[in-house]
Image: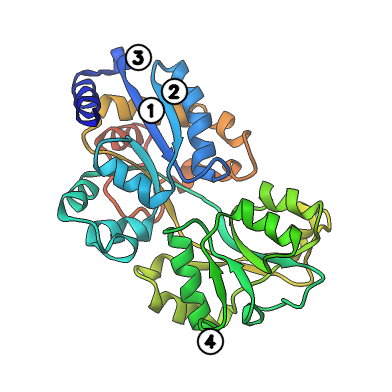
Amino acid sequence: MRWMRNAAIAIALTTVSAGAAGAQELVFSGVSPTSDDYQLGVVWSGIAREAGLRMTVVENGTVAGMRKAAQGEVDIVGVGAPHYLDAVGGTGAYTEDPEALREGYRDMKAILALPVGMAQYVAPADGDIRAFADLAGKTVGIGRPGGNAGRVTQTLFGIHGIADSVDGQAIEYGPALEQIASGTMDATLVWGSIPTAAIDNASRATRLRFVSPDPATLDAFREEVSNGQYYVYQRIPAAAIEKAYEGRVVAEEDAYFWTFPYQIMVRGDVDEDTVYALTKALWENIETVNGASAALSLVTLEDALSSISADLHPGAARYYREIGRL
């Protein structure tokens, strides 16, 4: 009885206060258990518990998570700044969404900007794939079915002139890395930071190398993807790769990964006191967050409001005003 559950959540959201935050049950939707936003949710849920808030973390992917949030099935979700604009405007991965969902997207508000992982392409180090164009004629994992990473990857294939010759397989990167190890896949996209656990584990059995998009294609790339002004090719120095993977990932030169600003969104009908308490709990315990992983060590107040493409939730804005960030 989904409508009954949503009604119960709606009632709770309108009655909770900072002093009675323990009555609130929040659902945080992350991309996957290895994604930065999911890991933030896990750490944050522990911090929130100490503040009297109950938060459960679930896995949905970005697009499905956004749709569930718009329908009231989850409360908090991570989404890229450009993809939030896609959701509101009915473009990109959200082209087929009905107006009712877009209205739900418009009601969502931001809590903070989150430094997230990057789209990395890896192939066996002893193979013949050195440049992105070398993926021509190869079988390549492009991420979970229906995911934005797959669509962006297909765009990159087109920009590099190999769209008609790559066998792009919609498959999550865990199974894709296993297929690389068994010799049934040539390369795959992996979303994550440096180091990424999935790549680190796979590199212990098979030496890997990163395959970068041509940096000269950035302008064309931005023109081809919706809200492309938010996208960048992040340069990762070879020395950083060498250090992160201790030589198991070949780094003969700097690598480039595409990425974009990310933001943690909350449904607009989650009350102000609850979001204030949640935001306050996060930043007053940021050392715990930063110590949880290399990726989360990058979460800082200085960058908390950078490149957000949505309005701040009133509860979050209240906290940022109190500490002089607004």
Q: Earlier in the sequence, mark 4 or mark 3?
A: 3
Helix, strand or loop under label 1: helix
Number of residues whose C-alpha sits closer than 10 Å to that of mark 3, classed few (under 14), some (14–19) or many (20 or more): some
Which quadrant, please, contains the N terminus?
A: top left
Task: Please tell me whether residue 199 is drawn above or below residue 11 in the rendered image.
Answer: below
**Depth check, front residue: 132 or 106:** 132
Amino acid at pointer 4? Gly
Residue that badge 3 annotates: 22
Q: Residue flagged by tag 1: what amino acid is it?
A: Leu
11 or 314, nearer to the observer: 11
Which of disc 2 and disc 4 is earlier in sequence? 2
Q: Which mark is residue 278?
A: 1
Residue at image location 50% in from the left, 77% down from the top: 218
In this rendering, the answer to whether 244 lies above or below 272 is below
CA gap, disc 2 and disc 3: 10 Å
Answer with mark 2 or mark 1, whichever residue precedes in sequence. Answer: 2
Disc 3 element: helix
